[in-house]
Each structure stands twice: as C-alpha cells, then as structure tokens.
Image (tube, rainbow, N blue to C red):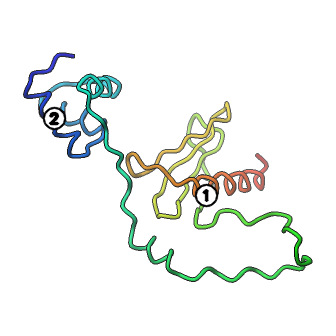
Amino acid sequence: MNLSPEQKQAVSSWIADGQSIAQVQKRLEEEFDLSITYMDARFLIDDLNLEIQDQKPKPSPTADLSAQAAPPPAPATDQPAGEAPAEAPVGGNVSVELDKLTRPGTVVSGDVTFSDGITAKWALDQQGRLMLEAAQEDYQPSKDDLTAFQAELSQKLQSKGY
C-alpha cells in the first residue's frame, strides 16, 4: 500500500499514542478516506517498522477494594484433616451464565463476568471451539480468570447435560 509521507507520519503518531490496529484502521478511513482490512492495517504497521504498544486495562476501583478485603473463612467440611476435598470450589470471582436462547450457529452460549468486572459473551460451536468476545476491545483476562472460567463453564455444562 502506498501512503503519502503525511499519512505515514499520521499512522506513526497514532501508534506512538498507543492506538490499536483497529483504531488505526478506523482513523485511516475517517481521516484519509482509505478503506483497508484489519490485516492490511497490520501489514502497514509492520512495513513502517512500528510496534504496537500493549494496552493493559486499568484496574477498576472495585478490584482494588476486593484485593484488600479479608478472604472469606473456609467452609466447614466433614472430611478428616489432611484429606483433599472431593471437588475444589471453582469460579472464584468469575461468574458464568448460560443463555436461555442459544445464539445462532452455536451449540451453547452465554455470558461471563471476570474478576475485574469485565463482561464477555462466550459460545461453543459444533466443533467444540470456544469463542470469547469481551465488551472491552483488546481485553485479555488473567490466567487465573481463564482457569476459573473454564472450570465453572465445564461444571455448568455438565449440570445441564452437555
């Protein structure tokens, strides 16, 4: 793709300001009337030797409060000391819900709320592939949240006979 020096400079400044590929793609359309695909925008950024900055979500004030709160007391069990529980509790601060009406093209779908309060839509297709679409662009849940999500999702699906 051939861009003018002015357009190249604009893309460079947008990337330096921390904008994502999708944002650069959108601004090229809006400001220069250049309609390109996401992949073309990615290649353009590579051709200009620019590097996308990692955008980590800012922690929400509620996440800070939950980190300072004392952990809840362990539930009483009838198991002898030293024996592991039959099934460890899953989910933590991750909440998984199943849709009453499954989204078209999927076997099962629903919503998830991660520990930092970010919500996402999830779905399983006919090949068993998990799709996750967060409300916040470029959101990446923590490894602990993903583990909790997978465990709670598995538990919910088993309880519904999937």
Instruction: Please state which of residues 16 and 159 is positioned toward the viewer in this rendering.
Output: 16
Looking at the rendered structure, the secondary structure element under dot 2 is helix
Pointer 1 with pointer 2, Cβ within 8 A = no
Crowd around label 2: few <14 · some 14–19 · many ≥20 (10 Å): few
Crowd around label 1: few <14 · some 14–19 · many ≥20 (10 Å): some
Q: Residue at x 64, y 44 (%)?
A: 108
Q: Residue at x 18, y 25 (%)?
A: 34
* Numbered marks: total: 2
The answer to whether residue 38 is left or right of residue 71 is left
Q: Residue at x 61, y 40 (%)?
A: 130
The answer to whether 129 is drawn above or below residue 109 in the figure is above
Q: Residue at x 53, y 44 (%)?
A: 132
What residue type is disc 2 on? Glu
Percent across and percent down for residue 10 are 13, 34
Name the residue that disc number 2 marks.
Answer: 30
Percent across and percent down for residue 44 are 26, 24
Looking at the rendered structure, the secondary structure element under dot 1 is strand
Name the residue that disc number 1 marks.
Answer: 97
